[in-house]
Amino acid sequence: MENDVQLIRRILSGDDEAFSTLVEKHQKGVHALAWRKVKDFHYAEEITQDTFLKAYKKLSTLKNPNQFAGWLYVIANRLCINWLQRHKPAMQSLEDTPMEEIEESSYAHYTSEQRETEGTEHRHEIAEKLLSKLPESERTVMTLHYLGEMTAKEISKFLGVSVNTITNRLWRARKRLREDQELLVQEVLGGVQFPANLTENIMRQVADLKPIPPPVAKPLLPWGAFGIATFLVVFLLGATHQHLVRFQKPYSFEAASEPTVEIVDTFIVLDIDSKPDLRNQVGRATSANKNIGTRLQTPDTPLVSETRGNSLRFPTAQWTRKEDMPTARSDFSTSVVDGKIFAIGGQVRLELDEFGDLTLSKVEMYDPETDTWERRTDMPTPRSAVSTSVVDGKIFAIGGDQAEKIKVPRGYSWKTKKLTTVEMYDPATDTWTQKADMPTPRSFLSTSVMDGKIYAIGGMSNSNEQWRLETVEVYDPATDTWAKARDITHARSCTAISVVNGEIYAIGGRGWSGVQNEPDPYLSSVEVFNLKTNQWQEITEMPTPRTSHTASIVDGKVYVIGGYIQEDKKYKNLGTIEIYDPATDCWTQAPDMLIGRSGHMTEVVDGQIYIFGGDSDGAEGPLTSVEVYDPRAVP
């Protein structure tokens, strides 16, 4: 059987019969995806036809035929989104159906011989409800597997993720469902009759279409490019020995269009005398008057990325060192009021033989204009893992932990208490005021402000049943009251939250597996909350799963910075910066940070991102370093 590349070559040579083979090869997967999105087999058939017709017309614009399956997914998904936007009032949500109601209906009841037709319709309804209770990623994989009759390898190519990821998603989805429930879903989806005349209908319309011809380059362009390239090679080899390296390709399987883009990062390589195994030790002070902090270079000098062998690599992004934080702390929070950045609460590090309270109430204010820190009035309740948000120039500190290091017979342990405490800080008067408690005690939650109200999202609880929460509660500062809101789809803590164009974006974090003896996942999923529809919707996943990271908004784009993940049973702090553009639903990557870090905080002032503290591999305690990053300086 011919592969996609061979078939595409035949199609571009004018062989429409090859396109018929291509349709038959991929139509079940596209149809399954369309049904998964719109939940209507008739409309799914129409979207499937439109997907292949659009693909036929634009086939000559596909630069890499090996990526045909992923490209087809982009087209189908975009058509589904357009359909949902046109038919939104007619849609009915299954999210409000209690799981108990589904579980009351046994599999045997719907396989009874009586009222067979009605039973079949009801089986379809129950299967849809069962699928709706799964996370979006698992729901899609289950549908493609059973309805689209696709293998894990085929789904991998279609969705653009690894085979192992697909296998894990299938396994988790099956674990979440009881055996009879999974069997019901499998039989319902596997029993759907695929439209017999779909390929015939598509090919009938293909006969009347003319594919878009491939773009023809201007004759002078190659010669001009050759001349410029020759000049650059001579200049680079003769003057500075610079090397141009490919940095990364953009990540998006749901982009509105299908351009090919490459972001190039340039490094200057200098030959120096240094030992290959020697590197700067993060966390060690190098000046006599500094007991805490990291001094890699002088404050006003752009910093070096890293030392590898005999080369120093200078990234194109400008990182400028600023005055260190006065207090070394982790799990703290920051907020911006009138261009000033406030560091609030957090946790200190004690030596092995030290015991006692770990939490801080300390508040320190940083002024970017003067590059100075100032001590402010302490928060009344010491706490770490607190979340802060600003409404009308007031900072609201919500939830968090009170942690204590205690001595036990064989060493030491930690004693923690989750808080519901809410306290308001007024920078103008430098005073704190107690406010109404949050209904659910939790720490490592995330908060954001929309329409003057604070949304408290996810976090960690003390419950033995579920450590990580999908709970969302809304605080109204005007009335000092709390209300329940629509839960987020994935339970998560340490997630990064941003508000763009009146919508809340919840990005990554640590999830909750819900399966005994299975580690909680590091999430790459991204969910968007729309206040008008009161719904959370999953969008294109972040390329790198991570937790304890941050998200900052510059020019309408979301900069996701740092975080950590576990690899080979070891924790790894990340230096990656990934950028999400809500306008195109597309991810790209910027040059890495100077050092990988997690548990840090970032704030934006005048279009520049300030990064504070955090933890880093090899550091002796929390970092105190402060650096500023200018996204607009990156090519």
Image (cartoon, rainbow, N blue to C red):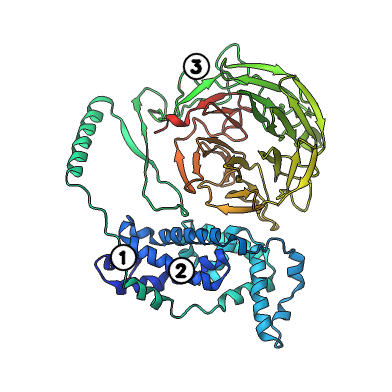
Residue 326 visible, this orientation: yes
Location of mark 3 (residue): 298
Q: Earlier in the sequence, mark 1 or mark 2?
A: 1
Residue 459, above or below 253: above
Q: How many marks?
A: 3
Q: Is residue 187 left or right of residue 236?
A: right
Q: Earlier in the sequence, mark 3 or mark 1?
A: 1
Residue 628, above or below 64: above
Q: Secondary structure at mark 1?
A: helix
The Cα atoms of the two marked residues, 3 and 2, are separated by: 60 Å
Instruction: List x then y, in percent, for residue 75.
Output: 44, 60
- Quadrant of image for the N terminus: bottom left
Residue 516, above or below 41: above
Location of mark 1 (residue): 8
Q: Earlier in the sequence, mark 3 or mark 2?
A: 2
Q: Are marks 1 and 2 in contact (CB under 8 Å)?
A: no
Instruction: List x then y, in percent, for residue 375.
Output: 70, 17
Specify the amino acid type for callout 3.
Thr
Of circles 3 and 2, which is in front?
2
- Residue 48 tag number: 2
Q: Are marks 3 and 2 in contact (CB under 8 Å)?
A: no
Instruction: List x then y, in percent, for residue 232.
Output: 24, 32
Residue placed farthest to the bottom in the image? 113
